[in-house]
Amino acid sequence: MTKTFSRNGLELVFYQKEGDEKYSFYLKDEPILTEHLLNSVKTKRVREDKIKYAVKGIFNLIFKSGGLLQETALSVYYSFCFKSLQSELLDNKKLNLKKEEKMRNPIIELSERVQSTFGENIEARVVGKMGPDHEPKIFVEIILPDGNRYKGEGANKRLAKQDAAKKALEDYTASVEAKATR
């Protein structure tokens, strides 16, 4: 046996299972709102003579200012926003990984290329230092097995070595491309 009550487009349905003296309820075509409603009420089943009080209380709970309808709408909205943000973060992470692949450490990139071409390692050494101790300028030279030398500078040895490696990579890439077009 069922009893249906409507208010503002929502249908509240009370139903009774066979052999049960109490009625349970749900909101027709509103599973999310029904779930929120059942989680927010103390009594989930009522006797037939108490249905009119349950209907009044349930509709008040749903439609009052800041009530369950608003909470459910916000919950659905936040869930959507979270999923959208999560998707955007995953997309950004994928883009960053692609950028990282392209922006590898120039020292490693140069070392790998030189190793595959010459079968030897690059040689790097500090050739100078200028400026005060709290703000030095370091000069590094990278020497390739073929004798080519590339100078770089930076605030520390690593940055100076990266600068020299970038210059060497540019030159190395240009010479490989030149050989390929001959």
Image (cartoon, rainbow, N blue to C red):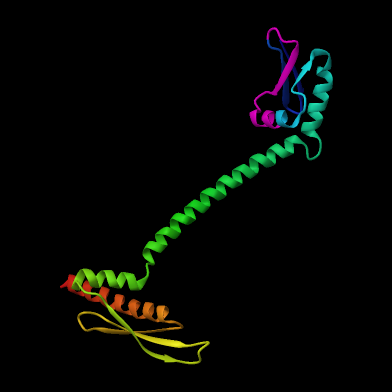
Tell which of 7 and 70 is nearer to you: 70
Q: Is residue 169 above or below residue 76?
A: below
**Percent position of residue 41, x then y:** 76, 29
User: Which quarter shows the N terminus?
Assistant: top right
**Percent position of residue 57, x then y:** 82, 27
Give the side of residue 137 with respect to residue 59, left or right. Answer: left
Which portion, as a residue range, is magenta?
Answer: 18-36
Tell which of 117 and 83 is nearer to you: 117
Give the side of residue 11 with respect to residue 124, left or right. Answer: right
Residue pictured at 74% horizontal, 32% vertical: 40
Q: Is residue 159 above or below residue 81?
A: below
**Percent position of residue 122, x then y:** 27, 77
Give the side of residue 124 with respect to residue 92, left or right. Answer: left
Q: Is residue 20 magenta?
A: yes
Residue pictured at 56% horizontal, 47% vertical: 84
Tell which of 47 and 64 is nearer to you: 47
Q: Residue furthest top?
A: 19
Corner quadrant of residue 109: bottom left
Q: Is residue 179 magenta?
A: no
Residue pictured at 71% horizontal, 28% vertical: 38
Q: Residue furthest bottom?
A: 131
